[in-house]
Amino acid sequence: MNSSGDSCSSLMEVAFDHHHHHGHDDRELHVLAVDDNLIDRKLVERLLKISSCKVTTAENALRALEYLGLGDQNQHIDALTNNDLKVNLIITDYCMPGMTGFELLKKVKQESSNLKEVPVVIMSSENIPTRINKCLASGAQMFMQKPLKLSDVEKLKCHLMNCRI
């Protein structure tokens, strides 16, 4: 019997009740999951869906930026006025070809006033303290070790819900 798990789920219910009067959209986290590895991406997507999150996936950082409206084609005005795009969380792999998760994090935090409040979680299969510290110092919400487990996702969701109370 894991008592910390129980307190976490009851906190989540409190957070949900707190948001209830805003309509049901507030209760569903919309997560953008970015990973160049299909298997990892599917795993993250499945864990998030089990945790009743809405998930959008991107296979690289550039795709993610396009989706967020920060792509090079100046379409970001349209993207940000489109409310369906409201992402509550970005989960990205650290090591990706082209642009790393760290560079994606920096772009989101520095180049968009609309997005810099969105929590970014970095995942990596390597546990390198200097890398972890660099990401956290640049504004990452959390650093998670891959492969992700359902308990990691639940912990993260609980953490985010508590932040929103």
Image (cartoon, rainbow, N blue to C red):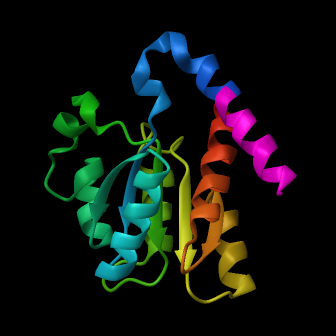
Q: Position of residue 41 (x, y in %)?
A: 35, 72
User: In this rendering, would 19 be left or right of 7?
Assistant: left
Residue 37 in sight from this viewpoint = no
Q: Residue at x 63, y 43 (%)?
A: 160
- As for residue 6 lying within the magenta part, the answer is yes
User: In this rendering, would 1 be left or right of 86?
Assistant: right
Q: Position of residue 158 (x, y in %)?
A: 66, 45
In the picture as drawn, the residue positioned furthest to the top comes out as 21
Q: Which residues are magenta?
A: 1-13
Quarter in which the N terminus is drawn = bottom right
**Residue 2 picture quarter:** bottom right
**Residue 35 picture quarter:** bottom left
Looking at this view, is 40 or 58 the one in front? 40
- As for residue 54 lying within the magenta part, the answer is no
Q: Residue at x 22, y 31 (%)?
A: 82
User: In this rendering, would 97 be left or right of 115?
Assistant: left
Q: Residue at x 51, y 52 (%)?
A: 109
Q: Is residue 11 above or below residue 49?
A: above
Residue 61 in sight from this viewpoint = yes
Q: Position of residue 42 (x, y in %)?
A: 33, 71
Looking at this view, is 10 or 63 the one in front? 10
Q: Residue at x 42, y 37 (%)?
A: 114
Q: Is residue 12 above or below residue 134?
A: above
Q: Position of residue 112 (x, y in %)?
A: 41, 45
Magenta-drawn stretch, dominant element (helix, strand or loop): helix
Quarter in which the C terminus is drawn = top right
**Residue 104 picture quarter:** bottom left
Q: Is residue 38 above or below residue 142?
A: below
Looking at this view, is 88 or 53 the one in front? 53
Looking at this view, is 105 or 47 the one in front? 47
